[in-house]
Image: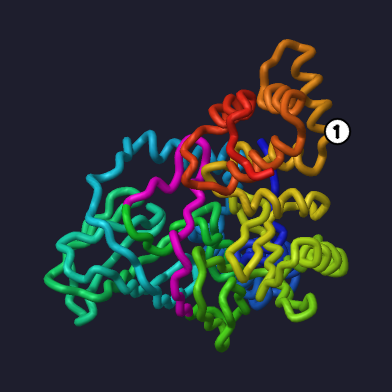
Amino acid sequence: MLISPDLAYGYSLRPYRIFAYAVWILVLCAVLFFYISKERGKKKRLFSAVVCLVAGMCLLPFVFRSNSDIIYDDMNSEGAGREISYYERNNITSPDACPEFKITSYDMELKLSNVLHAEVKVSVSPSALDIYGFTLYHGYKVKEVKDESGRALKFKQTGDWVEVESAGETSSLTFSYDGYSNTHYSNGQGAALPGTFAYYPRAGYVVCADADGYEHLTLDEPTQFNVRIKNRKKFFTNLDRTGKNMFSGKTTGLTIVGGFYKEDKIGDTNLVYTSVGRDVNEIKKVFSNLMETYDRSFNTIMVAELREGKYLRDYGDTLVFTGMSLTGIEMDYFLSQVPEIRADFGLQAYVFEYMRDTFASYAAGDKSIGMNTRYVRVEAAADKYGDEYCRKAIDKYLYDESDTRTPDEFIDDLNRGTENIKN
């Protein structure tokens, strides 16, 4: 099992753990008073009994604690196994396709306590559909859906999907739900909610997870969010802060973190980072160099403890880094710019572009043991047509999402010399 504890969570400070410490202290006191009371009368015995009673009461938070206290890494066998077994056990299949629509804005009030309690209003377009279909992770249970007039609507929640029946034309729907995820947690201790996770309703039916882990879901275009988080602790998002735990702005995925985090600045850029196990001076230096190298500026950079799928995700005006080491940040940034449909070819493209000798050595090694890998085949094309031809062709293919070829089909064409590139 791969163990990777969340440094921002503060496991030892969970209330049930503090009560557990108190139990041992009180039990020791009770034992001491018990022996003392043998010689000093009934008052001491009564006090000893009271101490035992208090110790017993301290066990209650431990016994009745919420499952949202149990945090898994989706990369370890237990966390991943729980998700896979859920889908296999329930034989979840996607419902029939619903009519297409867009969510034009979100208004969210999130209360983080024992679990996540959410009231989320989504503005929808078009407004005259009979059925609206949404994706919401199955760990969150919908209690009620209302239209803009406050009228309760019929809905059906099946696995990760919620089907809502409208009662005439409606411009918005308000969901009330609560629940938790053991990987992407949100409770009174903190939050680790990546923008790629369906903890708020998404338009249409999408699979949230499969045998390979969580799907990484982002919105098709930047969407307006207005968010209020009800908790006495300070939380952080990839939106502009407008008040105490209040945020507003546009993004393709709302990211929320809370726990052991601090704020700083890199020039005019806001920096949010895990305050445990991180050197803020190193963070500033690395991201300052990155912005200078790629001529980019960001409103916010987040160095967070999240299970995001990518070590670096670019939300436009916000950059979210979730890796352990800052050493390969240039490669992480390169891969963050590669469209999802080209993700499995991104690493080879990076090595060819920026680590040419390493690419050649990989190709030679694979060829020596009779393997016809992508490294071998791209190297063959470079031998025939030159590095510059391959670089331009690879760059064009990576970012042209209208090109429907698979990476292997592209490499076959690369070896034929048929790529139409400008010299």
Q: Is residue 173 above or below residue 412?
A: below
Residue at 77% x, 78% y: name it.
Answer: 265
Is residue 38 shown to the viewer in this render? no
Q: Is residue 147 magenta?
A: no
Secondary structure of the residue carrying tag 1 is: helix
Residue receiving disc 1: 357
In which quadrant is the N terminus drawn? Answer: top right
Q: Position of residue 110 (x, y in %)?
A: 45, 74
Can the viewer see residue 85?
yes
Residue at image location 64% in from the left, 24% down from the top: 415
Is residue 231 or residue 212 the one in the foreground?
212
Q: How is the image coloured?
A: rainbow
Query: What residue do we see at 79% from left, 75% from top?
Result: 266
Q: Which of these two is toward me, 407 or 109?
A: 407
Extreme residue in the top direction = 370
Q: Image height check: is 284 above or below 79?
A: below
